[in-house]
Image (cartoon, rainbow, N blue to C red):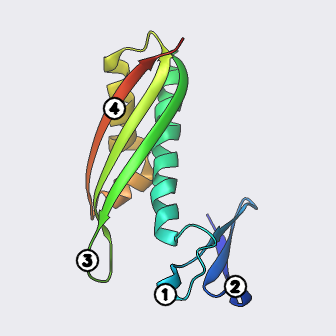
Amino acid sequence: MKCTVRWLSSAGMAFLGESGSGHTTMMDGAPEGGGRNLAPRPMELLLMGTGGCTAYDVVHILKKARADVRDCEVSLEAERAAEDPKVFERIHFHFKVVGRGLQQKQVERAINLSHDKYCSASIMLAKSAAITHSYEIVEAQ
């Protein structure tokens, strides 16, 4: 896996990231650090990427089990250390899984498999942060 990150000097502290697959994303710093608040902070993208990684796993695992999953949303809330390096110390994942006839056991299993075996991002972050999760199942109309 490769990527390139380039400073956009004319935009203060904004950076353009390009993934090895050819996709781009912007990052920017907070105004107090010279940024102009043009895009998410790099650490916000790390947290979003972790949410995307685990949500992908949960949907994939449920679909593979032939569950009638219709939607999945994960909200993440993280606490960072007060001093540099301001690593994540705690991260809570809350999953909202929508489907028809979803069973609590299968949703719980999908979340646990993601966190214990498949989601590289959350497994890596668990080395420095306490990770917790909760979920709710919503019956689709």
Residue 113 relative to residue 48: left or right: left
Q: CA distance from mark 1 to mark 3?
A: 16 Å
Query: Residue 91's x, y, as percent?
Result: 31, 54
Q: Are marks 4 and 3 in contact (CB under 8 Å)?
A: no
Q: Are marks 3 and 2 in contact (CB under 8 Å)?
A: no
Identify residue for label 2: 11
Kindly identify the residue that appears in the image at 61 percent across and 69 percent down. Answer: 39
Identify residue for label 3: 82
Q: CA distance from mark 1 to mark 4?
A: 36 Å
Rendered view: 86 above or below 79:
below
The C terminus sits in image quarter: top right
Secondary structure of residue under mark 1: helix
Q: Label for residue 33?
A: 1
Q: CA distance from mark 2 to mark 1?
A: 13 Å
Kindly identify the residue that appears in the image at 49 percent across and 36 percent down. Answer: 73
Secondary structure of residue under mark 3: loop
Q: Label for residue 99?
A: none
Q: Label for residue 135?
A: 4
The disc labelled 3 sits on which kind of residue? Ala
Q: Are marks 1 and 3 in contact (CB under 8 Å)?
A: no
Secondary structure of residue under mark 4: strand
Q: CA distance from mark 4 to mark 2?
A: 40 Å
Res 65 visible:
no
Rendered view: 38 above or below 85:
above
Query: Residue 1's x, y, as percent?
Result: 61, 63
Dot 1 surroundings within 10 Å: few (below 14), some, or many (20 or more)? Answer: few
Image quadrant where residue 113 sits: top left
